[in-house]
Amino acid sequence: MKSPVQTVIIHHTALRYCDSVSQLAHIQHMHMQERGFDDIGYNFLISGDGMVYEGRGWGIVGAHAKEHNFNSVGIAFMGNFNDEMPSSAAQSALLRLLHIGVLHGHVWPNFVLEGHRDVAKTECPGEYLYALLPKLRDQLQNQ
């Protein structure tokens, strides 16, 4: 993938709330066995306790948003955010991760933050997380 990317696409896993590695292993199994991916499709995942897990990482083309994988980073919040808000720890983790991405030249400083539904016909990243994206965009601009 060419760096820096100009777009960050936010997803949710649409599974139950997560703050453990066991759900991460479940997601990896689903992506590899059911979808035929080489590994987890997301570049990063964030659990409810604010832990950031590396999927494909920086600079590797993801498998998270068809037709947008080559010019974006996909970050999935672990949980179903049609039902609840992501934790403040998870929100803070996203801000830190993106700050690091910009500092290390993986993400363009004026990147676009979108929800998966902005680039595909889907409910992802859930109603509550999607509604939170403008606030997160503002926080990123004020860092």
Image (tube, helix red, strand yellow):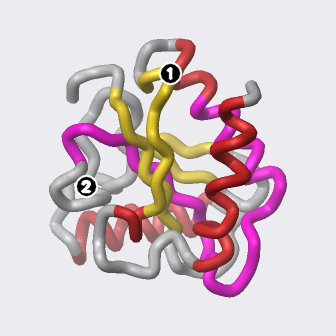
Q: Quadrant of the C terminus?
A: top right
43 shown above or below 59: below
Residue 71 on image: x %, y %: 25, 38
Picture quadrant of residue 57: top left
Front in this rendered view, residue 21 or 135: 135
Name which residue type carries label 2.
Ala
What is the crowding at mark 1: few (fewer than 14 residues within 10 Å), some, or many (at least 20)?
A: some
What is the crowding at mark 2: few (fewer than 14 residues within 10 Å), some, or many (at least 20)?
A: many
Residue 128 on image: x %, y %: 67, 75
**What residue sits 34% from the left and 30% below the top?**
5
Which SS class for mark 2? loop
Q: Residue furthest bottom?
A: 83
State yes or no: residue 82 in magenta: yes
Name which residue type carries label 1.
Pro
Location of mark 1 (residue): 109
**What residue sits 52% from the left and 68% below the top?**
12
Q: Mark 1 vs mark 2: which is more N-terminal?
A: 2
Q: Which residues are magenta?
A: 69-98
Q: Is residue 114 left or right of residue 32?
A: right
Residue 38 on image: x %, y %: 20, 53
Label 1, label 2: how many angstroms apart (C-alpha)?
Answer: 23 Å
Residue 40 on image: x %, y %: 34, 55
Number of marks in the image? 2
Picture quadrant of residue 48: bottom right
Which SS class for mark 1? strand
Q: Is residue 74 left or right of residue 134?
A: left
Label disc, if present, on residue 5 of the rendered structure: none
Location of mark 2 (residue): 63
